[in-house]
Structures are given as C-alpha cells and as structure tokens.
C-alpha cells in the first residue's frame, strides 16, 4: 500500500473543485439494477469504493464503463443474485445491493459484511426492512439468503436513523406493490439525492430529507442520466484541515447547507467563513490557532461522524481544550490514539475524547487506521514541524479521489510514495 509524505507548516491557500459524492454514488449505482437498460452517471469520483461497487455490478451481469468521470451501467442482462465475498469484505456498503436485487430478481445472497475499525456495524435494520417488505431471510454459515416472490408495501420504523438501512428499504420499496411508509428515516443529503435520482427513474417518493419517507410502488423504473452532487465530507475535510494548517481556501461545488453544523463549529473555533449557496462555494480563512471547542456527532443534520476524526486533528492544534463525543459508531477513535504520535495530548473516556491543543505538532511516521482517520492524520501532519509519513494510503484512496493532488493545489507539500 502506498504512503503519503508531508512537509508540515505550509499554510493552505487557493481554490479547489470538490469531487462527486462517494456516499451518494454508491447507492445510486446499486439503484441502476432496478432498470433494464443503461444508466449514465456523471461526476463519479475515481475512488476504490466505486471500483468495488463496479465489480459487484459486473459480477451480477451488468456491463459497466467509466471514463473521465462518466459511468455507464447497462443493467439489461442482470442474472446474478450473489454478491461476491471479495467485495463484501472490502466494502460494507455492498449490502446496499440486497434491496434492488430482491426487487429485480426476487433473490439475493451475501456473506455478512464484517465489522471494521468503526465497530460491529450490524445489518439488522437492513434485514428488518426487507423482511417487513415481504422477504424471507435465512442465515447460515455466515451467509444471508433473501428471497421474495413479491415485495409489498409496509409501515417501517427504524430504531436508529441508519443511512444504509434507509437506502436499502427505499431501493426495495420503489417497485413493491402498494405504499411504504418509512419512519425514523435517515435525513442525510445523500438520501435526498438518491430519492431524487430514483424519482427521475420513475419512482414515486415523498418526504426525502425528513424523518418520514413515503413510497408508492410502481410497476417498473427506467434508466436515466444524472450528474452527482459534490462530496460534502470531502469539502468538510479540506476546510477542517485548514483549521489545523492555517490559511485561506475556497472549496467549490458543495452546498453549504449540507455542512451547516460543521461550518458553525468552524466559526466557533475562530475561522472566518463566507458561504455562497447560489455559487456553491465555501471560503474559510484561519489566522492563528483554532480555539478549543465541544461537539458531539449525530445523524444529519447534526455534526457528521465522518468529520469527527479530522476535527480531532484540528483540536490537537487548538489554543485550549476540546471535547468530542462520538454517538454514531461505538469505536471511531482509532485516529485519536495515533494522533498522540504527533505529540497530541488526547484522553479517551468512553465515547468522549478530551484534547489539549499544542502547536506546532511533532512530525511522525504513522499508519492510517481507516478512511477518515487517514485524512485526519494528514491534517495533523500539515501542522507538524517537519516531514511526516502516513502509511496505508489505500484507506484514504477509498473515498478521496486524489487527496495529495487536492492539497498540493492548495499549496501543501504532500506526495504519494508508491512502495
Ligand atoms: C453510512 O454508513 C456512510 N457510508 C458512512 O460513511 C457514515 O459514517 C454513516 O452512514 C453514518 O453517517 C456510506 O454511505 C457508504 P449507518 P452506514 O447505518 O449506512 C448502526 C465514510 O467514511 N447500525 O447510519 O453503514 C451502525 O452500527 C463512511 O464515508 C445498526 O445497528 O451507517 C452504526 O453504529 C463510514 N444496524 C450506526 O447504526 C444496522 O442495520 C450508523 O450506521 C445498520 C446500522
């Protein structure tokens, strides 16, 4: 796996266009299974998770092509019903294919997606929704077999506003017979985009973005052409990295309204934010060190768990003490332990991290624990007095198209070292 070398203490400046959204494109690629023709997606990020989802679709019989940000998915001849284990282990969100496969072919099989550094990550809510919609689910030897002669509308209530379970339920319900009402649904912008995409395919959905989504099943969906929105977590990552590194940057393409909670937090930390909703541009100026802060992650529209690690890194450079509580995943502090190698003073107590900031940080040689944790280590290295190395860059490549290219555009001295 390649490594990333960082020369610290270079303030960031400049403007970058943000890549298409990873967490929007993955369920939309799964949704392409619902149409017996060719779906076209534009502004698709060239990331490892898209490669994995492409491999799954091709294993099921789709013909995919991807060049220069545009992807075509010909799902005319889908016949496979089993998700290859090699992908399930790599990418948890492969489970998102269960719903559309059941809807299309009446059958779907997968191995249990394992836990990961974030925690156990069960899929009980996904299976609950599919069963309520009429699927029979058998579990044996680490495999799940779902079958449904017909899917019928149902009233579903999620005990937690799970993003993936909401997406799977919607993907299964759009061609089910009758009405489905999904309560306590996730409200993330990626859900809104998925539902808009499905509506463009002919689905009848209302309430996306609220906690109650209503779906009126239709006979069939048709393929459509779609341009993805920008990746709000990618935008938030670069903005938060600038809190640590200092500087003056603008990120283009992301809707500032999708980052309301983190932008308010950045202002509380002393950053100057200028957000233009019409132009979809967010400018951040950070002079001096950020102030300490307190924050807790939560389902949208709360502070997003996917920005928790990079805000931890910013807290390590703060002038003062910070507290971050993680409420979505039970084990998302892997990066916190590694940030200590940069000289950060971090104490963990249950789901809360307490950080006493210092500046500059010390350079370090570390290994990325996961996707967002890796980005956080990069942000810390930007504030370290010397050259740092972050091994395991493959984790970062799962979700960031080319984080070194983007940070270099912003003036950082960051390079990928291929081993
Ligand atoms: C999606 O994961 C995102 N991934 C994650 O982003 C994100 O962190 C997460 O939502 C929360 O916003 C994609 O969209 C591809 P959840 P997902 O179901 O759907 C528990 C990244 O870095 N849960 O909302 O897996 C679960 O254990 C990734 O881009 C159950 O208990 O998240 C977790 O504690 C990381 N049973 C909590 O809910 C279930 O059946 C949130 O999970 C499902 C989930």
Image: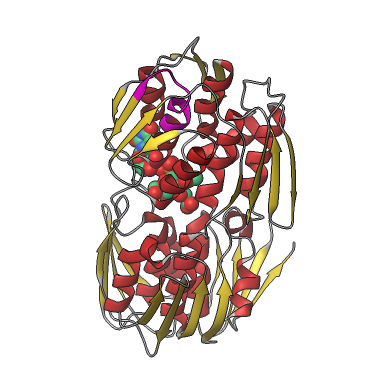
Left/right of residue 121 with respect to residue 223 in the rendered view? left
Tell me, yes or no, whether the highlighted magenta stretch contains residue 151.
no
Tell me, yes or no, whether the highlighted magenta stretch contains residue 172.
yes
Colouring chosen for the image of the structure: secondary structure
Left/right of residue 114 with respect to residue 153 in the rendered view? right
In the image, what residue occupies the spot 39% across and 52% down? 332
Q: Quadrant of the N terminus?
A: bottom right
10 w.r.t. 75: above or below: below
Where's residue 202, x and y in %? Answer: 51, 34
Note whether residue 72 is visible: yes
Where's residue 333, x and y in %? Answer: 38, 56
226 w.r.t. 255: above or below: above
Note whether residue 117 is visible: no
Q: Quadrant of the C terminus?
A: bottom right
Left/right of residue 246 with respect to residue 319 in the rendered view? right
Quadrant of the rendered image containing residue 104: top right
Q: How many marks?
A: 0
In the image, what residue occupies the spot 59% across and 17% down? 105
Region rendered in magenta: 169-179
Where's residue 308, x and y in %? Answer: 37, 61
In front here: 243 or 235? Answer: 235
In the image, what residue occupies the spot 54% across and 15% down? 106
363 w.r.t. 231: above or below: below
In front here: 369 or 215? Answer: 215
**Extreme residue in the bottom direction:** 288
Quadrant of the rendered image containing residue 168: top left
Q: Answer with the quadrant where ligand 1 appears in the image.
A: top left
In the image, what residue occupies the spot 34% across and 71% down? 263
Where's residue 191, x and y in %? Answer: 42, 45
């Amino acid at each position: 796996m390649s490594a990333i070398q960082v020369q610290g203490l270079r303030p960031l400046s400049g403007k970058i266009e943000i890549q298409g959204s990873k967490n929007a494109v993955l369920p939309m690629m799964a949704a392409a299974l619902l149409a017996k023709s060719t779906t076209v997606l534009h502004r698709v990020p060239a990331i490892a998770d898209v490669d994995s989802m492409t491999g799954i679709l091709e294993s099921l019989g789709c013909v995919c092509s991807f060049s220069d940000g545009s992807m075509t998915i010909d799902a005319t001849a889908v016949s496979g019903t089993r998700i290859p284990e090699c992908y399930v282990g790599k990418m948890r969100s492969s489970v998102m294919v269960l719903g559309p496969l059941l809807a299309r072919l009446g059958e779907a099989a997968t191995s249990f997606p394992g836990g990961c550094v974030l925690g156990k990550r069960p899929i009980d809510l996904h299976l609950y929704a599919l069963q309520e919609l009429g699927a029979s689910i058998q579990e044996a030897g680490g495999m799940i077999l779902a079958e449904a002669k017909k899917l019928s509308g149902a009233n579903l209530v999620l005990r937690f506003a799970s993003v993936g379970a909401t997406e799977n339920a919607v993907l299964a319900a759009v061609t089910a017979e009758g009405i489905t009402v999904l309560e306590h649904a996730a409200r993330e912008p990626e859900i809104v985009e998925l539902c808009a995409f499905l509506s463009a395919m002919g689905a009848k959905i209302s309430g996306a973005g609220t906690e109650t989504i209503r779906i009126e099943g239709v006979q069939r969906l048709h393929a459509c052409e779609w341009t993805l929105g920008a990746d709000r977590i990618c935008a938030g990552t670069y903005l938060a990295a600038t809190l640590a590194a200092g500087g003056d940057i603008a990120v283009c393409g992301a809707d500032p309204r999708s980052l309301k909670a983190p932008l308010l937090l950045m202002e509380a930390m002393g950053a100057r934010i200028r957000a233009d909703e019409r132009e979809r541009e967010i400018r951040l100026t950070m002079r001096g060190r950020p102030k300490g802060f307190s924050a807790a992650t939560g389902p949208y529209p709360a502070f997003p768990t996917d920005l928790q690690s990079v805000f931890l890194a910013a807290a390590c450079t703060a002038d003062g003490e910070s507290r971050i509580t993680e409420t979505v995943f039970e084990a998302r502090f892997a990066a916190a332990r590694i940030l200590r190698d940069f000289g950060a003073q971090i104490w963990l107590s249950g789901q809360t991290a307490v950080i006493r900031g210092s500046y500059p940080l010390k350079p370090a040689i570390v290994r990325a624990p996961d996707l967002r944790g890796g980005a956080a280590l990069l942000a810390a290295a930007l504030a370290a007095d010397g050259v740092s190395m972050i091994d395991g860059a493959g984790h970062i490549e799962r979700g960031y198209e080319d984080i070194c290219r983007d940070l270099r555009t912003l003036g950082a001295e960051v390079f990928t070292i291929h081993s």
